[in-house]
Image (spheres, helix red, strand yellow):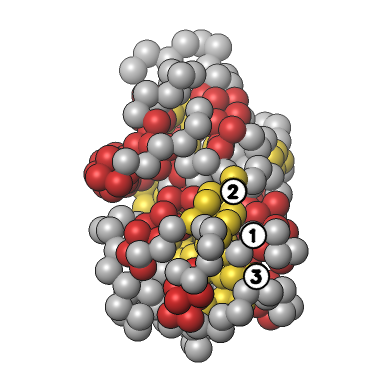
């Protein structure tokens, strides 16, 4: 590919200034929490300062479109989760015209963690079966919170509700942090939170954690049963965990993407990072940009199947 003279010198000295990593949700959510856990070591691997910029709103679209419209010069990246695959499946064709497969270059996949089905302390249930039974005695549907329309927590909750035969009203917040605050304050009855967030709330007696979405019990929550294996909840064949990846504006030069990919690989292989992440049941995995692109394509396909079958719609 022909590289213009204006770009070539920049690649040879890259990076020569701080790099922005945009999280499309407010501070305190799963994606923000995960990336802050690895940001210091990643900055060292890149040889440049990292600026984490939270741009929440519209279920992620504010931050997603901001990065998509940024110059493809290697100084603005998106730290995304599987909501990036859920939203195209949910909206099919967004009014904004945003399309992650068209608008981004996939750079690198990094890490995953299960979610925890948590309930407010004022709900009279201490196990998942008790909660299901309670929900069916209520004269009105209970409220559940999420990080926003189309967020991972939103759609994972829809899968759980479908599998358990429950009905509820979705209350979208502007990110995982506000949703976590809402469940702690008993403003909603339930929230599916990332394990690191849920574990902290459970230890602080702010919520009750009833089940995890992983196939095996989480080592840091050994007494919390799994939905599929332990409780036998039959759910759709979709990813029920958070996974994270880095994306760049379309057209970001391959040498720059390769350098970020290798820096992430080194970071996820760093013993201190691996120990830190595994303590909160986050898998410090790594996969190249080509694998991340395939993962995103599969997420869109699999979630489309579930969303279409259940007729799930949200306001745009």
Q: In this view, does 56 lie to the left or right of 149?
A: right
Image spot of residue 42 (x, y percent): 60, 52
* Mark 3, residue position: 120
Residue 45 seen in render: no
Q: Would residue 49 be visible to someone looking at this image?
A: yes
Tell me the number on the disc at residue 97: none
To which residue does mark 2 refer? 171
Q: Identify the mark nearer the N-term, 2 or 3.
A: 3
Where does residue 10 sit, x and y in percent of width and height?
58, 23
Indicate the secondary structure of the residue bearing disc 2.
strand
User: Mark 1: few, some, or many residues within 10 Å (few <14, many ≥20)?
Assistant: many
Q: On the rendered image, what quadrant is the N terminus found in?
A: top left
Residue 23 picture location, percent across and down: 61, 42
Distance, label 1 to label 2, CA atoms, is 8 Å
Dots 2 and 3: beta carbons under 8 Å?
no
* Viewer-closest of 88 and 282: 88
Quarter holding residue 303 = top left
Query: Vertically, is 28 above or below 313?
Result: below
Q: Tell me which numbered mark, 1 or 2, is placed earlier along the sequence.
A: 2
Q: Nearer the viewer, residue 104 or 58?
A: 58
Residue 75 in the image: x percent, y percent? Answer: 61, 30
Secondary structure state at the residue bearing disc 3? strand
Q: Do the residues labelled 1 and 3 touch (CB within 8 Å)?
A: yes
Q: In this view, does 128 lie above or below 16?
A: below
Q: Which residue was labeled with disc 1?
A: 188
């Amino acid at each position: 590919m022909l590289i213009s003279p204006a770009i070539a010198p920049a690649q040879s000295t890259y990076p020569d200034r701080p790099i922005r990593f945009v999280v499309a949700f407010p501070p305190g959510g799963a994606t923000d929490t995960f990336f802050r856990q690895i940001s210091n070591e990643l900055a060292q691997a890149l040889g440049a300062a990292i600026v984490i910029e939270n741009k929440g709103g519209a279920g992620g679209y504010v931050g997603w479109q901001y990065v998509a419209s940024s110059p493809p010069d290697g100084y603005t990246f998106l730290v995304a989760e599987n909501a990036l695959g859920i939203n195209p499946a949910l909206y099919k064709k967004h009014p904004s015209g945003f399309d992650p497969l068209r608008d981004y270059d996939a750079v690198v996949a990094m890490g995953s963690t299960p979610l925890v089905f948590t309930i407010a302390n004022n709900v009279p249930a201490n196990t998942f079966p008790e909660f299901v039974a309670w929900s069916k005695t209520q004269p009105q549907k209970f409220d559940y919170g999420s990080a926003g329309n189309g967020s991972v927590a939103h759609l994972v909750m829809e899968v759980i509700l479908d599998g358990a035969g429950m009905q509820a009203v979705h209350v979208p917040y502007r990110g995982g942090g506000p949703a976590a605050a809402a469940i702690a304050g008993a403003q909603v009855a339930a929230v599916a939170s990332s394990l690191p967030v849920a574990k902290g709330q459970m230890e602080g007696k702010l919520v009750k954690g009833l089940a995890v979405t992983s196939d095996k019990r989480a080592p840091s929550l050994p007494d919390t049963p799994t939905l599929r294996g332990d409780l036998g909840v039959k759910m759709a064949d979709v990813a029920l965990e958070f996974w994270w990846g880095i994306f760049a504006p379309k057209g970001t030069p391959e040498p720059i993407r390769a350098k970020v990919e290798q820096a992430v690989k080194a970071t996820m292989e760093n013993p201190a990072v691996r120990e830190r992440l595994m303590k909160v049941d986050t898998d410090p995995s790594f996969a190249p940009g080509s694998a991340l692109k395939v993962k995103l394509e599969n997420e869109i396909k699999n979630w489309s199947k579930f969303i279409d079958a259940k007729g799930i719609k949200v306001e745009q």
